[in-house]
């Protein structure tokens, strides 16, 4: 986290507010007609 690296504490509202950050957990993609399922960035099927 860039803000923590700048010396801002972990209790900074921009960091602790869940509406201000995003986390992609699950993704379905197709590459060249081959489908992949990814969970937290790791390919789990395909």
Image: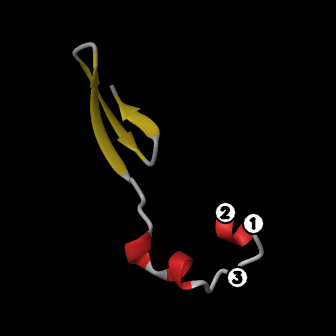
Residue drawn at point x = 70 percent, y = 71 percent? 4
Upstream in sequence: badge 2 or badge 3: 2
Q: Residues within 10 Å of mark 1 (few under 14, many from 20)?
A: few
x then y, percent, for residue 20: 42, 72
Residue drawn at point x = 62 percent, y = 86 percent? 11
Front position in the image: 38 or 17: 17
Q: Disc 3 marks which residue?
A: 9
x then y, percent, for residue 22: 41, 62
Looking at the rendered structure, which numbered label has been put on residue 2?
Answer: 2
Q: Residues within 10 Å of mark 3 (few under 14, many from 20)?
A: few
Which residue is the extreme one toward the left?
A: 33
Q: Are discs 2 and 1 less than 8 Å apart at CB?
A: yes
Which residue is the extreme one toward the top?
A: 32
Front position in the image: 13 or 42: 13
Residue drawn at point x = 42 percent, y = 59 percent? 23
Q: Residues within 10 Å of mark 2 (few under 14, many from 20)?
A: few
Q: Disc 1 marks which residue?
A: 5
Q: CA distance from mark 3 to mark 1?
A: 9 Å
Relative to 25, is 14 on the left or the right?
right
Relative to 8, is 32 on the left or the right?
left
Quadrant of image for the N terminus: bottom right
Q: Quadrant of residue 35?
A: top left
């Amino acid at each position: 986290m860039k803000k923590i690296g700048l010396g801002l504490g972990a209790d900074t509202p921009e960091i602790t507010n869940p509406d201000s950050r995003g986390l992609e957990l699950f993704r379905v993609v197709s590459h060249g007609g081959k489908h992949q399922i990814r969970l937290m960035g790791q390919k789990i099927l395909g």
